[in-house]
Amino acid sequence: MIKFLSKRGQVSNFIVMDLFEEARNLSNQGNKIIHFEAGQPTAKLPNIAFKQALNKIKKTNVSYTNPLGLELLKKKISNFYLKNYKSKIDYNRIIITFGSSGAFILAFLSAFDKGDTIGVTVPNYPAYKNMIQAFDLKMKPIFCNSKKNFEYNFKNICKYKNIDGLLISNPLNPTGAVINKEEINKISVFCKKNNIRIIADEIYHGIDFTKKSDTFFNHNKDSIIINSFSKYFLLTGWRIGWMVCPDNLYSSIKNLAPNLFVAPPTISQYVALSSLNYGNFLNKIVKTYKKNMELLYTELPKIGFRPVLKPEGSFYLYADISKISNDSEKLCKNLLKKYGLVLTPGIDFDSKEGKKYVRFCYSYPEKEIIKGIKKLNSIFN
């Protein structure tokens, strides 16, 4: 028997995925589960959006598209940037990918070599560190100050001049903070000066409550911009995303993409094309997220969960549980097992201080949010 195992493949699992699977098993057994864990929307686009895509598919063979994506979709995304950010982006620089995950794979392979160091804000999306490990890169944690509500700005990174890349999400997962234009510009100038490549994870753009998120592209044309149709556009399971590719990486990505993926999923691209027509509908969905956020932000402190800040974007709220528990993983497992309520433990996002925090996802219908608040209130009060 061959016993060798690659170290690159020895990555950790998300704890929340184990909880999600257990919750699904309990649900299949007839138990009622209250969900606050899954980072995906529960709303769906109007049926007409899928009908339009289906009509297009009926008129064409569902074969491979161009390895870098449908030209029509790329042009429409380019117009989306012009309309929403006043960004003039050549559609040829837009690469359609297999979800944002495909974009991250192309970004890491094209921009960095083995042993390069990537600075990553903490707390963060747990897949970041696992992808960095899998590509034989080194992660430099950039810890946000918990005493200052995990505020992330230029001051957090200005001492890290020797990193090769900076991976940053905006709005931030799990806190829901939004980095303003001034801070984006300071970070961008710093990275240009020190030859640091920015990978900007902008998959929660569009889900903004107080101010519109700006794209790093407007401040640093060498940034790799990654976005997705999964969150704002409600197409999580269709696995379709995109990246805005810097000029000097285009040749590499053009060759890598077909070798790794052949082409992005054809049907998903046509559905994505339709979704770009539903901005007004999608903005109404964002208003429901904001309403849910306000509800949680008001009620959770009464139960013992202290929000670290009032979210400005995404559909997440990060809460301090110090008054309730000193072990977020144990708390979350206990809540599921005893009460049928699922939260995401902070340890998934922050190995240093995550035991003191949990993340709430509020993309569920308002009645489910209210039901969850009542359940938590009955448990802790």
Image: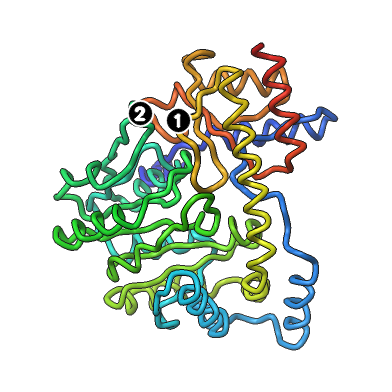
Using residue 113 as the reference point, say whether residue 320 is left or right of it.
Answer: right
Q: Quadrant of the C terminus?
A: top right
Q: CA distance from mark 2 to mark 1?
A: 8 Å
Per the image, the residue denoted by label 1 is: 308
Using residue 198 as the reference point, say whether residue 263 is left or right of it.
Answer: right
Closest to the observer: 204 or 56?
A: 204
Q: Residue at x 75, y 36 (%)?
A: 368
Residue type for callout 2: Ser
Residue type for callout 1: Val
x then y, percent, for residue 171:
45, 50
Per the image, the residue denoted by label 2 is: 146
In the rendered view, tell whether residue 144 sits above or below residue 314. Answer: above
In the rendered view, tell whether residue 134 sits above or below residue 280. Answer: above
Q: Mark 1 falls on what kind of element?
A: loop
Give yes or no for contact between labels 2 and 1 (Cβ–Cβ under 8 Å). yes
Closest to the observer: 210 or 87?
A: 210
Q: Is there any visible trace of residue 67 in the rendered image?
A: no
- Tally the numbered discs: 2
In the rendered view, tell whether residue 151 sits above or below residue 355. Answer: below
x then y, percent, for residue 293:
60, 39
Q: Residue at x 76, y 78 (%)?
A: 52
In the rendered view, tell whether residue 133 sits above or below residue 74. Answer: above
- Among the two numbered marks 2 and 1 on one chain, the one whose residue lies closer to the N terminus: 2
Q: Is there any visible trace of residue 287 in the rendered image?
A: yes
Q: Mark 2 falls on what kind of element?
A: helix
Closest to the observer: 267 or 2?
A: 267
x then y, percent, for residue 176:
48, 43
Closest to the observer: 195 or 14?
A: 195
Disc 1 residue crowd, few under 14, some 14–19, many 20+, Cα 10 Å: many
x then y, percent, for residue 359:
53, 33
Q: Residue at x 60, y 30 (%)?
A: 343
Q: Residue at x 64, y 51 (%)?
A: 287
